[in-house]
Image: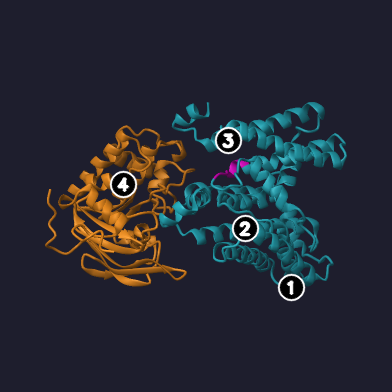
Amino acid sequence: MTIDRSGTPLVEMRNMSISFGGINAVDDVSVDLYPGEVVGLLGHNGAGKSTLIKMLSGAYKPSGGQIFVDGNPVQIHSPRDARELNIETIYQTLALADNLDAASNLFLGRELISPLGFVDDAAMEAETRKIMGRLNPNFRKFAAPVSALSGGQRQSVAIARAVYFNARILIMDEPTAALGPHETQMVAELIQQLKAEGIGIFLIDHDVHAVMELCDRASVMKNGKLVGTVDIPDVTDDDLLSMIILGKKPGEDANAD
Amino acid sequence: MNNILTKLPFVSNVRFRDAGTLVGLLLIALVFSILSPSFLTMPNIGNILQQSSINACIALGMTLVIISGGIDLSVGPVAALSATLGAAMMVAGVPVPIAMLGAIAVGVSCGFVNGALIAWGGLQPFIVTLGGLSLYRALALIYTGGTPIFGIPSEFRSIANGAVMGVPTPVIIVAILALIAWVVLTKTPLGEYLMAVGGNPEAARVAGVPVSLTKISAYMISGALASIASLILIGRLGAAEPTLGNLWELDAIAASAIGGASLMGGRGSIVGTLLGCVILGALRNGLTLLNVQAFYQLLATGIIIIVAMLIDRATSGK
C-alpha cells in the first residue's frame, strides 16, 4: 500500500526543541505523519525519540518549535489537550493502573457517567466487552484487576483504550517489546487494521527489524538531533543501523570524519 | 481459591477481603460472648458502636487518603483545632449551625494545606502531615492558652447526646457519612481517580486524571471528617480541650489497615474500615467487661493489628 503524501499531513512537528538542565534533549527536530501511515522513530536510548514524542502527547512542554494538526497550529499543554486533538499514546510501560479492572482502565479519566452523576460501571463494562470482542476475542478477564493479565492482554487493553476514543494519531512506544511471537503478530495485524482506518501511527522502537516490518517511513535520531527521514522501501536494515550508530544518511560517506 | 472466586461475576477481590474482616469480627464477638454474658446484649452493642463512631469518622477519611497513596497523621490536631475554634464561636454567641460549618471549614482548610504541600509542593505525605501534627496542635494550644473551652450551648450538646429510635445520634451521623464515603469511592469519578492515583500515579496522569486535585480532595475530606468527629466529641463532653484527639491517627490507620487498605495505595474499602473500627471497639469493650487492665488492652490491640496483617498477607497470595 502506498501512502498519499500530497495532501496536508495529519500532524507535523516543526523545529521542535527542549532542554533539561542545559542539555538539549531534542534539538531542532522536524517530523511529520500522513493519514494511514506508520512512521518509525529510531535511535539509541537517550537519542531523544521518546522526549520528542512526549511533546506531542502533552507530557513535556517544548521550549521551541510548533506542532500542526491538519495544518493548523496547536498548543498541547497536557495529556488532556492531546486527547482533544485525538492524539492517543500507548506507553512502553503499559500505563495501566494495576489495581483496576479492564473497564476502569479503558475509561480512566473519561468515565461514563449516569444521569445522576455516578460512574456507570455496567455501561463501561458493556462497551469494554464490545471493543475487546473486536480486538481480542479471547479476552475474558473483565472483572479481574489488570495485574492478573498477561503482557499481550494488557497491551490489548491499552490499544483498545486508544481505539475506543477515536484516535486519529496514535503514538506507540515499543508496543511489542514485552510480547511473545504470537502476541507480536496480533499487534502487527492490529496496526494494519488501524492503518486501513486512516489512523496515523508514530512507532517508537530501537528494534530495526520491527520498524522495517511495520513502518512506511523512519525518522532516525541521534544525540537529540534528527539524522534523517527515509522511505522504508528504499533502505535496508544496514542503512538504518548505520544511521542510528554513525548518525549519517545512506549515501553520505560514513568515513568522512 | 481467590482466583476462582474472582471469576464469578459478583465476587470481587474487595468483597472477598471484607468477608474476611467480617469473619474476624464474628470470631472476636464469639469469644467475648462466651467469656462475658453481657457482651452480646443490645445496650452493649449500642455502646460498642457509639465508642467506635468517632474513630470510624476519622478512619473514613484516612481510608480515602491511604487509597490515594498517602497518609494523614494530622487528624487528631486538626480535630483539636477545629473543636476549639468551633467551641469558641459557639461561646461567643455565633449560631450553632454556623459555628459547626466554621469548625468544618477549619478542618477542610487544614486538609487543603496538607494536600497542597503534598500534591503541588511535591513533599512526602508522611512528613507533611507529621509537621501538621505539631503545627495544628500548637495552634490549638496557643489559641486556647492550653485551657479547655467550657460553656458549649446545650442545644448543640443535645445533638451529640440524642438518640433516634434507641440508636445514638453519633452512630447515625457516622453511618450516613460512611454511606456517602462508600458512594464517593465506588460510584463517582473521584473514587476511580483515588484508586488510580494510589495504584499507579503515572498511569493516572497520562490518562488525564487530575492527580493533584484528586490528592488534595482526599486530604480535604479527611480534614472535614476530623472536624465532624471533634464536634461529636465536644458535644458529648461539653468542653473543647486543645489536647483532644491525641493518637487518633493511629487508631484510624489501624482500622483502615485491618479493613484491607494497603499503605502502598490503590487498595481499601469503606465497609472493611467500618468493620475494622468495630473490631477495635469490640476488643476494648470486651476486655473492659472482663476487667482486663488497660496495659493488656493495649497489648491485645497491637496483637490484633499484626495478626490481621499476617492473615492479609497470607491470603492475598503475594
* Label 4: which secondary element: loop
On screen, A195 above or below B303? Answer: below
Is residue B284 rendered magenta in the image? no
* The residue stretch that appears in magenta: B267-272
Residues tagged by mark 4 and mark 1 found on one chain of the structure: no
Q: CA distance from mark 3 to mark 1?
A: 48 Å
Q: Amino acid at mark 3?
A: Arg
Q: Tell which circle, 3 or 1, labels the residue nearer the N-terminal end.
A: 3
Sequence-wise, the earlier of marks 1 and 2 is 1
The residue shown at (77%, 56%) is: B246
Q: Number of labelled discs?
A: 4
Local secondary structure at mark 2: helix
Q: Which mark is residue A207?
A: 4
Crowding around mark 4 (Cα neighbors within 10 Å: few <14, some 14 to 19, many 20+) is some
Describe the element under mark 3 as helix, strand or loop: helix
Q: Which residue is mark 1?
A: B93
Alpha-carbon neighbours of circle 1 within 10 Å: few (<14), some, or many (≥20)? few
Residue in the image at 62% along x and 58% along y:
B125
Q: Is residue B210 visible?
A: yes
Same chain for labels 1 and 2? Say yes or no.
yes
In the rendered image of the structure, the colour used to display chain A is orange
Real-space Cα distance between discs 1 and 2?
37 Å
